[in-house]
Image (cartoon, rainbow, N blue to C red):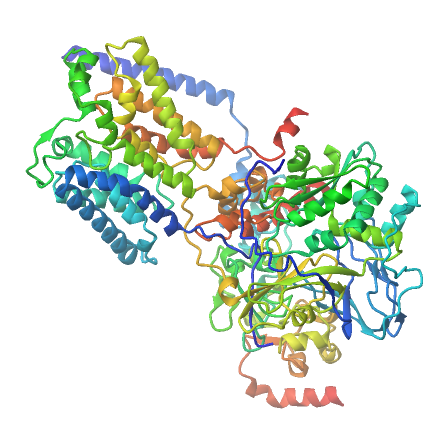
Amino acid sequence: MSEIVLYTILTVTAVGVTAATILYFAAQKFKVFEDPRIDQVEEALPSANCGGCGYPGCRNFADACVKADNLDSLFCPVGGNETMAKVAKILGKEVAQQAPKVAVVKCNGQPKFRARINVYDGPISCTIEHMMGAGDTACQYGCLGGGECVEACKFDAIHMNPNTMLPEVIDELCTACGACVVACPRDIIELRTKNKKDRKIFVSCVSQDKGATTTKVCQVGCIGCSKCLKVCEYDAITIGNNLAFIDSDKCRLCRKCVDVCPTNSILEIGFPPRKLKKEDSGADINQSNA
Amino acid sequence: MLRTFPKGGVHPPENKISADKPIEILPLPKQVAIPVSQHIGAPAKIIVNRKDKVKVGQIIASSGGFVSANIHSSVSGTIAKIDKVFDTSGYRKDVVIIDVEGDEWDDNILKSNDLIKQISYSKEEILKKITEAGIVGLGGATFPTHVKLAVPGGKKADILIINGVECEPYLTSDHRLMMEKSSELMVGTQLLMKALGVDKAIIGIENNKPDAIEKLTTLSKGFQGIEIQALKVKYPQGGEKQLIKAIINREVPSGALPIDVGAVVHNVGTAFAVYEAVQKNKPLFERVVTVTGKFVKSPKNLLVRIGTPTMQLIDAAGGLPENTGKVISGGPMMGKALNSLDAPVAKGTSGILLLSKDEAFRAETKACIRCAKCVNVCPMGLEPFLLMTVGERKIWDRMENERVMDCIECGSCSFVCPSNRPLLDYIRLGKNKVGQIIRQRKSN
Amino acid sequence: MSKLLSLALSPHEKGKESVSRLMYDVLIALLPAFIVAIFFYGLGAIIISLTAVISAIVFEYLITRYILKKPSTVMDGSAALTGLLIAFNVPSNLNPFLVVLGSFIAIAVAKMSFGGIGNNIFNPALVARVFLLISFPVQMTSWPVPIENRMKYLDAITGPTALGQLKEGVMNGQNVPAIISQMPSQMDMFLGQMTGSLGEVSALALIIGLIYMLIRGVISWHIPITIFTTVFLMQGGLWLANPGAFADPVFHLISGGLMLGAIFMATDYVTSPMNKKAMVYYALGIGVLTVVIRNFGAYPEGVSFAILIMNAVVPILNRYVKPKRFGEIIKNGK
């Protein structure tokens, strides 16, 4: 009996030693040198693996950071400036501060504003619906409501509002990784510079149709009338393809454009209730009319 | 002997309700909207302005590139405006809107209906006339005909196949054309043969049109080099690759064109348009459209000017029935659902099909039971169930490896699926995305 | 315009096939075998079938309704089919509690825990059969003698199956022709007059079901015919090599669960491969394994094990055996 135990122990030990030796030499032979800083940088990154930086994962981004001569074209939108400062410190490189951004859904085509003229009957997928034309409303630029942006978001920061049937971004959770921007087949979502207190003013429409067509299909579509362009004092507004665009870097949040927009397609979000500034804005309208 | 393609295929109910209805001429509409992109390729460039007077057959938009086609006015009158309206693609596209005044034809067009059998043009002249007439594939793919006839260097066509299959259920426009314009069709085929430089042409017709087979077979004895081949009924026999396989048993390689196996396929409608363009100087501005549906009052085959609003065709067939649930431009298997009844008839519109509310909506999607029916019916030997699963998960490279780009979008898989799964929708999604990736890779 | 039109990508037409139509077609194809079972086993056949079908449907309903909280899939007929197949795979004097347990294993363990219809790897009815066979070998291997037990149920007089007799005889060193000479004639076996599980006895009735399913296009011929051919050829080879030690191929084709397995179990949509080429490989594997288990294994009966083993291979077959693509030959020939 004891012999069996002995042999067992000996055999197992022999197998173990042989395997260990083979493994040791294999490890020596196939060893790959890796810059230890890659691990350090990866540690500093948020490990969200969202792809917002343009690389397939955090490790690839870390690798790129280590190999790059400067960090100008590299930025982790999720970690923001804080993380990039850490990365720069590890690598001993300079990094420029970048303004934080947030995703904004540029369509306000709620059912009450935008009539459904047809019934889409296919699978729930924005891209598929987009392939077959304008979809169930007559607007060929607006939100289709399939929720592919919601699916794409890894931070749970975008949700469909069942009442408006449009996606809504939760600013606190949004990391501006851009996954929703890529997912949207109609390019409705835009990354805009974050303003103080999460206030934002933007043209909530991407329709390039002529004004007459836009008004026919949607009550809150931008018709490219240029009224906002005239009232803006900071040159933040440009008009192209029958569509106004507010540059978030230049906008000073004065809200004059909101008041003059005839179709209410410019939205203001995060501001205190309107009453406080009623007199000012009234004066603004008078001025622009004069 | 009846032939057919060996792999896959389905047998949807034929429903050729309007098969014995002669072609009627639709009265001129009050206003037409002529789209400038009625073909695959670059949209044509508009060369007229507002308030211009135009005649029937006058060119209003010129070819916008190599793969493109001229667009001609289908009516005489004044150009009201250049605008964007919904066309059959479901998007608002540029159109030329013309107010109709009288019916004054361009002077060069021979209006008589006499058959001109004598071919007095050289190969180059025929090609030039086809190019000028803006002829595109009238079977539905709308690929510019002159591009198809320009055989690229190093390749040689040895046979012309004329597609008279009309495998789509309901549609009968090609059938009627073969019955009523058979001699013109024959001359058109000879013109195409001359343009291609081949001495053999086969007209493939499915066995459910015995009258057309008989008539053309008798006629073909008077035309050298043209044969008629009867085919067993099976969808999608009208697909180029399937038709070539069925008639001459050559298999077009994946990713290649029919010309790579020495064959060129044209639709009977195209052959007729070629006849009119070459022998009568008549550009492509009208076509035969089937207006049909199980509950349409009087299904019809109509000769329609391009740009006529769809609603007018439906009115001619007895008006829009109360319980219409879907209006389709084309046939039930490959047609496009229209989102606006004002969409103008384009060169590729072979039919307007009305479905009732019961027929229009899809049944509830259930789980895949892996019955493999989609694999068995796929004429391209693909695995639709797998493509859909992969497509739902957005794994585009796997989709490419599974040969999604080979799909001819015939719809057999979705047709046969017992769980009502939207297989083709996801395959189309995959083709769309993989196509983008391939284009990107090529440009890099 | 107030009328809302439906928008969807083509095709706009749908064939008549539906999951329930397919499942009910299989049920209809099982009818002849069921009638034969009632003729030979009477009361027991009816009790067992009803218990199995009803319990399978109830389990499916309860699980979809209360655990998965999904719309119930009871109406598509797949649970009823699984139940009936379980009944067909057990002796007609089985305790009803064991039948219910079998249904539970099939529906809850083999089907629903994988995510319901379409997602299971193994054939639920076979999992139930093998589970019962291994857990309750005595009850599962005492088959009532046909006809004389028509009005009896649990108290039926039992006897061995042809394959069991064969295996035992061979173990005892008897000559195969001598064992077979004690059994009913091959014609009787073909019609179903032999001991065995409920539905497997009559090869004739099962073949009628196969022909019905082929005509209706429910299954293709590839799986059953390949299994028959493989078993016939392989067993024929063994038999010709040594007629004293191996039974003849026809005996193996009509005895035991081979017909039932090849026609109804191996062709189960969910657990069989997705293209014809792979189906042939799959059926080939089942045929070879069946012959090997029957002749050289410990169990007299090998079809269930063969099918379950090949079920596990199906994902690999699906991954690597692709249908012939259109336009591929020429490309490779270049």
Can residue C130 be seen in this snapshot?
A: yes
Frontmost residue, A203 versus C5: C5
Where is residue A60? Give x, y as percent: 56, 41
- In the displayed structure image, the side of residue A151 where residue C131 appears, left or right: left
Vertical arrangement, residue A87 with respect to residue C41, above or below: below
Where is residue A285? Give x, y as percent: 69, 87
x 46%, y 34%: residue: C318
Quadrant position of the N terminus of chain A in the picture: top left
- In the displayed structure image, the side of residue B6 where residue C24 appears, left or right: left
- In the displayed structure image, the side of residue C115 where residue A227 appears, left or right: right
Q: How many marks?
A: 0
Frontmost residue, C315 versus A248: C315
Q: Quadrant of residue A37?
A: top right
Q: Quadrant of residue B331?
A: bottom right
Frontmost residue, B352 versus B364: B352
Quadrant position of the C terminus of chain A in the picture: bottom right
- In the displayed structure image, the side of residue A212 where residue C327 appears, left or right: left
Can residue A81 be seen in this snapshot?
A: no
